[in-house]
Amino acid sequence: MISQTWWYVARASGIVAWGLGVASVLWGTLLSTRILGTRPRGPWLLDLHRFLGGATVLFVGLHVGALVADSYEQFGLADVLLPFASGYQSIGVALGIVAMWLLLAVELSSLVMKRLPRHVWHTIHLLSYAVAFLSSVHLLVAGTDAGNPVLRVAAFVWMPAVVGLLVYRQLAPPLAPKRPTVAPTPAA
Ligand code: HEM
Ligand code: HEM
């Protein structure tokens, strides 16, 4: 009974982690389009993005921890940390493990983003698109609930939404230049 409980916890937390990760990517992409406003804008917009990212990490931790606690499939530490260490759904699980490491890189670099050059932080941050993609394929390949029609549709539906936002960002007219703070001196 206990082993079944951990298996259910692993499945449920995997789905929540995936949903939060995709929501974080969608919200981050939306912020980057400036559709929600230019700087300075409500700090809660970025706080919500940070919250979604942090919660994704926590639920991935629960997902992985529950798999180790579950005594039926017998995942060891190496099985959940190293791609292809586990014999269970090895390709599907490896995709989840790679997604987890990329997610950690995105999250940890963001926690120290003020100490990193902006372009370094941003290059690492772009890995979040790979996190969303790999974890979606992971869901479809390794997931017990991969046959669920709602999950199958959900695993794909975010992709055109993100692509649409990125296309909008490329095509949107450039922002109006900031007004000068000092009045120009009249021409002599
Ligand atoms: C402490 C955690 C995080 C912080 C502080 C943070 C911060 C930011 C900031 C400042 C932006 C730029 C918004 C703009 O252009 O105005 C951004 C964009 C973005 N974030 Fe995050 N983020 C965090 C975690 C995450 C996580 C965990 C994910 C997804 C796994 C994620 C996905 C994205 C995406 C997809 C973008 C748009 C990137 C682009 O195309 O330029 N972020 N984030
Ligand atoms: C970003 C990281 C990850 C996300 C978002 C994620 C998400 C998910 C989701 C949504 C499922 C399907 C759940 C279901 O069908 O009910 C799943 C299944 C699974 N995941 Fe992950 N996962 C991640 C990382 C990992 C890692 C690091 C492992 C390490 C072993 C792992 C192992 C598994 C296994 C064995 C399954 C199949 C069991 C099940 O159906 O729950 N995942 N994952």
Image (spheres, helix red, strand yellow):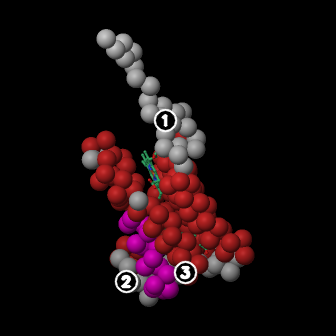
- Residue 163 location (% of width, % of height): 56, 63
User: Does label 3 point to a residue whose CB lies under 8 Å from ligand 2?
Assistant: yes
Dominant SS of magenta comes to helix
Question: Position of 97 compared to 56: left or right?
Answer: left
In the rendered structure, which amino acid carries the disc numbered 1? Answer: Ala
User: What's the residue at 46%, 57% (across, down)?
Assistant: 57
In the rendered structure, which amino acid carries the disc numbered 2? Answer: Ala
- Residue 146 location (% of width, % of height): 64, 78
Which badge, 2 or 1, comes first in the chain's sequence? 2
Asked if one can make out residue 37 in the rendered structure from this viewpoint, the answer is yes
Confirm or deny contact between disc 3 and disc 2 (CB under 8 A): no
Which badge, 3 or 2, comes first in the chain's sequence? 2
- Residue 184 location (% of width, % of height): 37, 17
In the rendered structure, which amino acid carries the disc numbered 3? Answer: Ala
User: What's the residue at 40%, 23% (across, down)?
Assistant: 180
* Residue under label 1: 176
